[in-house]
Amino acid sequence: MERLNEKKKKAECFTKVFEVKRLVTMAMLGGVAVVLMQFSTPLWFAPPFYELDLSEIPVLIGSFAMGPIAGIIIEFIKIMLDLVVSGTKTMFVGEFANFLMGCSLVVTSSLVYNYKKTKEAAAMGLAAGTICLVVVASVLNAYVLLPTYAIAFKLDLETLIAMGTEVNPIIKNLKTFIMFAVAPFNLVKGLLTSLITFLLYKKISSIIKSFNYK
């Protein structure tokens, strides 16, 4: 009986340590993500309020190593830390959008990868995640984000579209704004993020797993 209780206590202790290590790992990855958020750049075919960053790379790697729920938590930590570091310039609309679109990429990719955990599954997951990101970003921008931005900043939707036309003459209305700015912007972001993650994930994931299972 004493041995059974001792084994039970050891198991409970191991579980607590394991959970603490997971939380620490997620916090660290969220910290790396928010640092990467500070290095962003606009793309030539989209208006300047769309800026490309690589902050989803550590989130993806964490979700590959620890599962999709961990990816959502890391994404949330990233957004919260960024609010502390930089505040909000978009009345929280941009942060909310960043979270939803980040999760669309990360959760989809992680679900596919964690089904088999092979290089092929990783490639398929990242491809599926990128497609999901483009679709979610396009729908959100068309029906939620751009109209909300316009209301929040007391602008006409046409004014936002005109900002797109200035850098990309093909943009004439909301439909072409989505087709030639939002969709390609998120496609580039998804592909670049996926490529770097694919090249790095195995080595970094093994480090994360060794840290968590020691």
Image (cartoon, grey):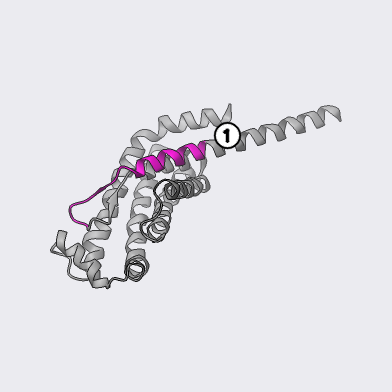
- Direction from residue 213 to residue 4 in the image, left or right: right
The stretch of residues the image draws in magenta is 25-46
Q: How many marks?
A: 1
Please state, as top left, top right, bottom left or bottom right, where the C terminus lies in the image. Answer: top right
Name the residue rendered at 79%, 28% in the picture. 6
Which residue appears at 27% of the width and 59% of the height? 183
In the image, residue 52 lies in the stretch drawn in magenta: no
Asked if one can make out residue 122 in the rendered structure from this viewpoint, the answer is no
| Left or right of 21 in this view: 76 | left
Amino acid on which disc 1 is placed? Lys
Q: Which residue is mark 1?
A: 21
Judged left or right of residue 141, residue 10 is: right
Helix, strand or loop at mark 1: helix
Q: Position of residue 30 (x, y in %)?
A: 46, 42
Closest to the observer: 128 or 99?
Answer: 99
Residue displayed at 52% across by 28% down: 210
| Above or below for 37 versus 171 | above
Residue in the foreground of this view, choosing between 146 and 206: 146
* The magenta stretch spans residue 36: yes
Q: Assign the N terminus to one quadrant of the image.
A: top right
Dividing the picture into quadrants, the one containing residue 9 is top right
Q: How far from the left and from the top, in percent, is residue 190? A: 32, 49
> Residue drawn 20% across and 62% down?
164
Q: Is residue 28 visible?
A: yes
Q: Residue furthest left?
A: 169
Relative to 87, does residue 198 appear above or below in the rendering?
above
